[in-house]
Image: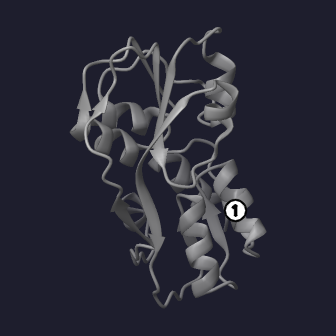
Amino acid sequence: MRLRALGYAVDVRPLVQIEVVETGLVDLSGYDWLVLTSATGARELRRRARGRAARVAAVGRATAEAWGEVDLVPAVSTQEGLLAELPRPAGRVLFAGAEGARSLLADELAADVVVLYRARPVSVAIEGDLAVVASPSAALSLAAANPALPVVSIGPETTAAARAAGLRVAAEAETPDVEGLVAAVAASE
């Protein structure tokens, strides 16, 4: 782990548990675009997918890597960034993701939606000087466990969820990946 290599004492504690939502096989045939917004969703859909969508868009590099070959990864790894770069009209779109995921892309593209998983909060005791949160659901779980602990957030949606839950955001990663998180931890000192 890079943070340990830089001299940080790191205690890894999952704040959410991923629970698969079984919807059976998912036929991608006939879709002009498949839109993926998480690596978890990409892996789960890969397991259940039948057929192929004409094109695939992934919100960021990690999601693209979890799926495999994709046609579009936006320069800004947010739903807004993906929406800005997706050609219009998009045609028939399938939005695959988590239960309770933001609906911006699905709404704007009048997409069909398939829910593949849900993130359940994990009740754990959390102590330390700083926590790193990589999803809005992790931020909410941390706020329930230790609302006084400052956080480093992976991106704007997680930052917004953390602040709404009463957490103090010490820094936000400039890029939603390991490098961005490591740099944000270093900047938070």
Decide if residue 59 is on the left or right side of residue 31.
right
Relative image position of residue 13 (x, y in whole percent): 40, 77
How many numbered marks appear?
A: 1
Q: Is 69 placed above or below 49 here?
A: above
| Closer to us: 117 or 165 | 117
Coloring applied to the structure: one colour
Q: Quadrant of residue 84?
A: top right
Q: Is 145 placed above or below 139 here?
A: below
| Closer to us: 8 or 20 | 20
User: Which residue shows up at 50% across the image and 39% down it?
Assistant: 37
User: Which residue shows up at 76% across the image and 67% down it?
Assistant: 163
User: Which residue shows up at 63% across the image and 47% down it?
Assistant: 102
Relative image position of residue 125 (x, y in whole percent): 48, 91
Relative image position of residue 59 (x, y in whole percent): 52, 33
Decide if residue 87 is on the left or right side of residue 44.
right
Q: Is 171 placed above or below 113 here?
A: below
The residue where tag 1 is placed is 161
Name the image quarter holding the C terminus.
Answer: bottom right
| Closer to us: 115 or 74 | 115
Amino acid of disc 1 = Ala
Name the image quarter holding the N terminus.
Answer: bottom left
Relative image position of residue 126 (x, y in whole percent): 51, 87
* Residue 130 visible in image: no
User: Which residue shows up at 55% across the image and 58% down it?
Assistant: 135
* Residue 153 visible in image: yes
- What SS does tag 1 mark? helix
Neighbor class of circle 1 (other Cα within 10 Å; few <14, some 14-19, many 20+) is some
